[in-house]
Amino acid sequence: MINEIMIFLLKTILGLFSLALLLRFYFQLLRVPYYNNIVQFLIAVTDFIVRPARRVIPGWRGLDMSTLVLAWLAECVIVTSVYLYQGFDFGANILTAIGVMGLLGMIEIIKITLYIVLFMIIAQAIISWVNPFSPMAPLLNTFTQPFLSVFRRRIPPIANVDLSPLFVLIIIQLLLMVVAGVHMEVRLMLD
C-alpha cells in the first residue's frame, strides 16, 4: 500500500515536472511566442534547475539541451524508482540495469512527446471550432504547424474541412503502438 502511494506520488510530481521541461524544450524548438502566459509559467517553474544545468550541459545549434536532458533524467529517476519500489534487484547486473533504465527513460520521453503532439492537435481543433480568437490559438497554431503542414501540402481541404489533423492523429496512434512494443522489448532485457 505504501509502495503504491509512493509510486503514484513520484510519477505525478516528477512526471509533471518532466512534462514542464519537455514543453519548455519544444516551445523553444518550435519558436512558440515567448509572451504567452503558458510559456512564462513553464519558464518560472523550471528555471530553478535549468539555469544551473546550462553551466554543465551546453546548448546545441541554438537549442537549450539542458531542458531535454533534465526531462530525460527525471524520467529515468521515475522508471528506476518504480522498479525499486516494486522490489526489483539491480545488484545482479547493475550495468545492464543502468542501460535499460536509460533506454526506458528515452522511450518515456518519446511517448510523452507523442502525447503532447496528440493533445495539442486535438486542442487546436476544438479551439478552432469554439473560439478561434482565443489567446491559446497562436500557441497551438505555432506548435502544430510543422506536423500539420506536411499533410496540408498534399491533401486539400474537402468541403472546407481540413483533414490533416486526422492523418497526424492516425500516425501518432501508430507510433504509440510501436513505442509500446519497443518498451516491452526493452523491459524483457532486465529478465
Image (tube, rainbow, N blue to C red):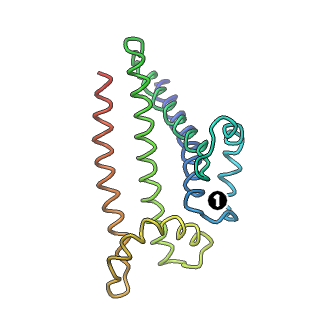
Residue 179 at x, y percent in the picture: 33, 45
Give the residue furthest to the top. Answer: 92
Give the residue furthest to the bottom. Answer: 159
Residue 147 at x, y percent in the picture: 43, 65
Q: Is residue 116 left or right of residue 65?
A: left
- Name the residue tied to disc 1: 38
Q: Residue at x 60, y 74 (%)?
A: 134
Answer above or below: position of 49 versus 25. above
User: 10 Å neighbourhood of mark 1: few (<14), some, or many (≥20)?
Assistant: some
Circle count: 1
Toward the viewer: 18 or 30?
A: 30
Snapshot quadrant of residue 135: bottom right
Q: Residue at x 46, y 26 (%)?
A: 80
Answer above or below: position of 119 versus 180. below
- Residue type, numbered disc 1: Ile
Answer above or below: position of 117 versus 187. below
Toward the viewer: 69 or 116?
A: 69
Residue 161 at x, y percent in the picture: 37, 82
Snapshot quadrant of residue 40: bottom right
Residue 171 at x, y percent in the picture: 32, 60
Location of the C terminus (image quadrant): top left
Q: Residue at x 42, y 69 (%)?
A: 148
Q: Residue at x 55, y 61 (%)?
A: 30
Element under disc 1: helix
